[in-house]
Image: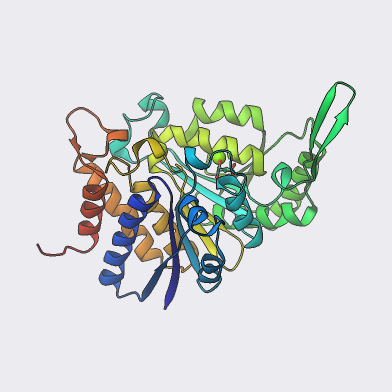
Amino acid sequence: MYKIAVLPGDGIGPEVISQAVMVLEAVSRRFGLPLEMREGLAGGAALEATGSALPQETRDLVMNSQAILFGAMGGPRWDKDPRMAGGSLLIMRKTLGLFANLRPVRLYPALENASTIKKEVVSGTDILVVRENTGGLYFGEKRMEEGEDGPRAIDTMVYSRGEVERVARLSFDLARRRRKKLTSVDKANVLLCSRLWREVVDEVSRDYPDVELNHLYVDNCAMQLVRAPRQFDVIVTENTFGDILSDEAAMVTGSLGMLPSASIGGKIGLYEPVHGSAPDIAGEDRANPIAAILSAALMLRYSFSLEDGASEIEAAVGRVLDRGYRTADIMEEGCRLVGTREMGRLIAEEIYPSGE
Ligand code: IPM
Ligand code: MG
């Protein structure tokens, strides 16, 4: 039995996650997989009901599962509430030991015109961004002080050899299963953390002579991503650089609505669309469910090693796009506009026709 905690959360979270669940049910029927999915409260709704964005009941559900399918947290009502969005997401990453955040950026051929960047430049892009997820500035010591001219804020970037080594190793392993090219991104001309990063990545690379390694400074990488994205296979970088570069890389595909993510490294993996709660379009059947659906595919691949199911979902998404169906965020002339539910249904039908 594969046990999955489903946490739809806020905003468009529930509508996109219910489509991902439907697609998982189709995969389960097609391949005869015993998937057990249980829903829990998280985010604003949970906060209103229990005073916590991650109530104990949800924590228990998570601890009894092998993977979490997560929608999104947050909205204008809770913007100033420190118990919300960022806070609880970071707590989940840290307490579950999810030290690597994988964000695959793959341009589906049908969407070559959806990018704001020229088709000749983006066509064929297929990048896996691996972001270190539990260290660096996000989790270093922080404090406020009284300075000479008023308050002074201090954040610290901290990395240990072990933290760099495990994410480097994972990235080399992933590159080995792809096009065998790894780009490590740092700021070694300025930061001590980056010098240690580079040293450790070089050391680990000796165990992977079949993987080609190169190093880029983060500013150069930001530029190369929009100049020539096809040069990249796997990119590995520290937490803050990864946060920024993965959003940038995402736009190569045209819409944040297409991007899934996987946080792995612990016993329980966390899978979520990159797009967030988008409260402005919540409940209107307009959101693109593909990021959530592709996150479910990543869950099958990385938590359960069900490669057949994962690639079937990815292929089904490609076929539905090839047939010209689009949600509003990726709509083009000559294509057929569909809502959240219809997009989900089309993808599920590709995987396991219901025979209506
Ligand atoms: C992300 C988000 C989060 C992050 C925020 C919501 C704290 O931007 O997952 O990339 O910075 O990690
Ligand atoms: Mg981010």
Q: Quadrant of residue 51?
A: bottom right
Q: Is residue 189 left or right of residue 268?
A: right
Q: x and y percent of residue 288 in the render?
A: 32, 43
Residue at far top of view: 149
* Chosen colour scheme: rainbow
Q: Nearer the viewer, residue 126 or 154?
A: 154
Whether residue 154 is situated above or below residue 160 in the rendered picture? above
Please identify the quadrant where the N terminus is shown: bottom left
Give the position of the C terminus as an image quadrant.
bottom left
Number of labels in the image equals 0
User: Is 355 rendered above or below residue 212?
Assistant: below
Query: Which image quadrant for residue 79?
Result: top right
In this view, 230 is above or below 165: above
Q: Position of residue 123 (x, y in %)?
A: 38, 33
Toward the bottom, the furthest residue is 1
Residue at the (64%, 44%) spot, across then down = 213
* Image location of residue 134, percent across then percent down: 67, 52
- The extreme left residue here reads 356
Residue at the (52%, 36%) spot, across then down: 247
Residue 281 x %, y %? 34, 37
Q: Residue at x 48, y 58 (%)?
A: 49
Q: Residue at x 36, y 76 (%)?
A: 34
Q: Which of 45/222 is in front?
A: 45
Q: Quadrant of ligand 1?
A: top right
Where is 345 relative to 37, above or below?
above
Task: Identify the image quadrant of residue 336.
Answer: top left
The answer to whether residue 311 is seen in the rendering is: yes
Specify whether 75 is left or right of 202. Answer: left
Front one among 272 and 167:
272
- On the question of residue 124 being in view, the answer is no
102 vs 164, left or right, is left
